[in-house]
Image (cartoon, rainbow, N blue to C red):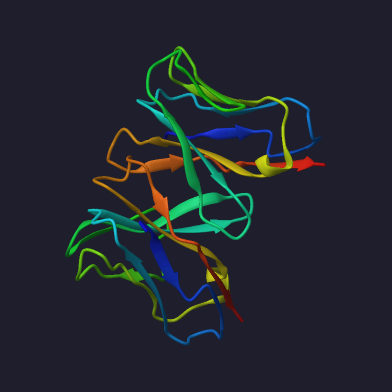
Amino acid sequence: EAQVTQNPRYLITVTGKKLTVTCSQNMNHEYMSWYRQDPGLGLRQIYYSMNVEVTDKGDVPEGYKVSRKEKRNFPLILESPSPNQTSLYFCASSLWTGDYEQYFGPGTRLTVT
Amino acid sequence: TQLLEQSPQFLSIQEGENLTVYCNSSSVFSSLQWYRQEPGEGPVLLVTVVTGGEVKKLKRLTFQFGDARKDSSLHITAAQPGDTGLYLCAGPMDSNYQLIWGAGTKLIIKP
């Protein structure tokens, strides 16, 4: 089954404790990205990757890191999480570029206390 | 700056009623995508409209792209509880290959 998977689905952590949210897609998509979704603000892109080893900032990259060492994986790293990073996070992939149909993962609900 | 504004932000109606939600911009878009997001899940693409004036139908859902390609609407006929969800529109930016997203319309259909 073609899908985007994310782990964990839920995470509660404390300020400053480094964490990684994994993302994997099995559709051989070139493009992957991370979004955060907050009430009233919609989806905001954090980082995206056009291909392996090619990443770029989205609209809200501060406090986040990403890497794309393999085509299928695109982990999101929070080196020192803060409470304002409490949000619902989505990984997405698309065939070629960011303006193609986006396939989303199920989401990761992160709470930073 | 390209923006997409969706209205209404929230809509709660009874099963069987008709409704229309809107996605508006002052900018021209080459295409617009509509997604539906159900609670606890990621958004899923419903349709992409590409040509000004285009109308696409998906069962009881009718999508229209404005003639000037600045706006789009989604009309649902005889809404069902299964239509409940967050409806998002998105369009490609001029400057790069990213999508701009509207904030969404949260739709609740009561049995």
Residue A101, visible in the rendered structure: yes
Task: Pick out the residue farthest to the front.
Answer: A1
Quick check: B93 left or right of B111?
A: left
Image coords of residue A80 (percent x, y): 44, 81
In the picture, measured across the screen, residue B77 lies left or right of residue B96, that is right
Quadrant occupied by the C terminus of chain A: bottom right
In the rendered image, the vertical position of residue B77 relative to residue A66, given as above or below: above
- Quarter residue A110 falls in: bottom right
Residue B94 screen position, x and y as percent: 31, 32
The x, y position of residue B8, in whole percent, is 69, 33
Q: Residue at x 41, y 66 (%)?
A: A5
Who is closer to the viewer here, B87 or B44?
Answer: B44
Residue that appears at 60% across and 34% down: B6
Residue sitting at x 27%, y 40%: B96
**Is residue A62 among what the camera can see?**
no
Q: Viewer-proximal residue, A46 or B36? A: B36
Q: Position of residue B81 (x, y in %)?
A: 73, 42
Would residue A15 appear left or right of A93 to someone viewing this image?
A: right
